[in-house]
Amino acid sequence: MKLIYGLLAFTITIPAAQSAIGAARELERVRVGYSVGGLIPFPLIVARENKIFEQLGLDVELINIPPTIAVTALVSGDIQYVAFAGTTLNAAVRGLPVKLVMVYNDRPLFSLMSKPELRSLKELKGKVLGVATLTSGESFLSRRLLKDAGVDADKEMILRVIGNTPDRLIALRTGIVDATTLTVPADIQAEKMGLRRLAFIGDRLESISGGLGVSERWLQQSPDQIKKMITAVFRGMAHARTQRAESIGLIAARWKMDRDVAEKALDLMLKTWSDNGLATDQAVQAAIEESLKLSGMKQQVPVSRVVEFSLARQAYRELKAK
């Protein structure tokens, strides 16, 4: 049982007096960059829908923005937070003054899907693997997964660049490729088409995907606010877990899914959530090494350059103590 269940008692009911006080005080304006395309920002959506941010004194504006532009805006101060953990980490590796302060998805929300006649990862030797690009994150994930299963995709498979998720699903369905990685809900849709889920990668690998990134300047300037944001994400996660029917309905409505697809999407997403808002040093170091490969950089980058988890640890301890 995940430790985060211990947070539930105080997340659901907020005393009326406390709410009244929160409404009376002036809220801090906060701008957060995120993407509406996938389920990664779901804890933030839940926190906003249930006024958890307001209860903590925050007026949060969620801004749909491409990841690379979001990090630029973070450095310039146009926004204060981004929900792009991987992009923040990559930027920090390149030397930009940004840091991850929380990781709430420490496992990938991807599945390796294949033609129905293929029944195991080992059967992919000699087959065609569809990837977004040769250096994309999902490409590295599928190759890591296959290598652990004894298949060297670079030497024993044909790698075919297909493009984004919808294109990869079409390529798999039409037989252009034998296997590819798909994220939720495309993997669930693929199953409905009769394609096979060889592995949910979140069951097999650690990989930093969802989290909060800030500029180093904001980390120095507003640690109390950052801790409030982290607390709100924890509370959003706890609410999503306990209010299952509400969460399924929110996913179905916001991401325009059938309810059965939304239910399965929720179950897969919950598997990827971090217990404590942190990523292990091993996971961070693996992400750094992957980022260095992507950029072609040869230097050594310490974990401390890309993450600062002290506020997440404090927030988690305080929530557990209540």
Image: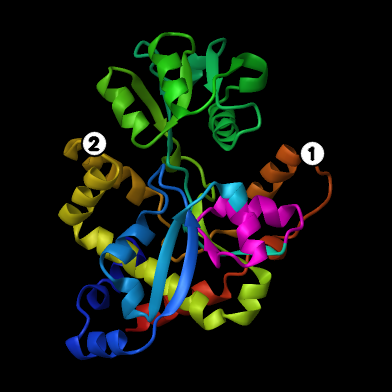
Using the rendered image of the protein, determine whether residue 282 is visible from the camera's viewpoint.
no
Residue with the most extreme right position: 299
Q: Earlier in the sequence, mark 2 or mark 1?
A: 2
Q: Quadrant of residue 54?
A: bottom left
Tell me: 302 left or right of 150: right
Q: Residues within 10 Å of mark 1 (few under 14, many from 20)?
A: few
Examine the image and state in which quarter residue 9 appears: bottom left
Q: Which residue is mark 2?
A: 261
Residue type at mark 1 is: Gly
Tell me if residue 155 comes above or below residue 41 in the rendering: above
Disc 2 marks which amino acid?
A: Val
In magenta, the rendered stretch is: 70-96
Taking the spot 35% from the left edge, 66% from the top edge, the residue there is 3
Above or below residue 279? Residue 314 is below
SS for tag 1?
A: loop
Q: Which residue is mark 1?
A: 296
Observer able to see residue 130: yes
Give the CA separation, mark 2 to mark 1.
39 Å
Q: Is residue 195 magenta?
A: no
Please tell me whether residue 91 belongs to the stretch shown in magenta. yes
- What residue is rendered at 36% in x and 78% in y? 320
Q: Residue at x 49, y 13 (%)?
A: 177
Residue displayed at 37% across by 37% down: 184
Q: Residue 226: x and y, percent?
A: 51, 75
Neighbour tally class for label 2: few under 14, some 14-19, many 20 plus, Cα within 10 Å:
some
Q: Is residue 196 left or right of residue 208?
A: left
Picture quadrant where residue 15 is located: bottom left
**Mark 2 secondary-structure assignment:** helix
What quarter of the picture does the C terminus occupy? bottom left
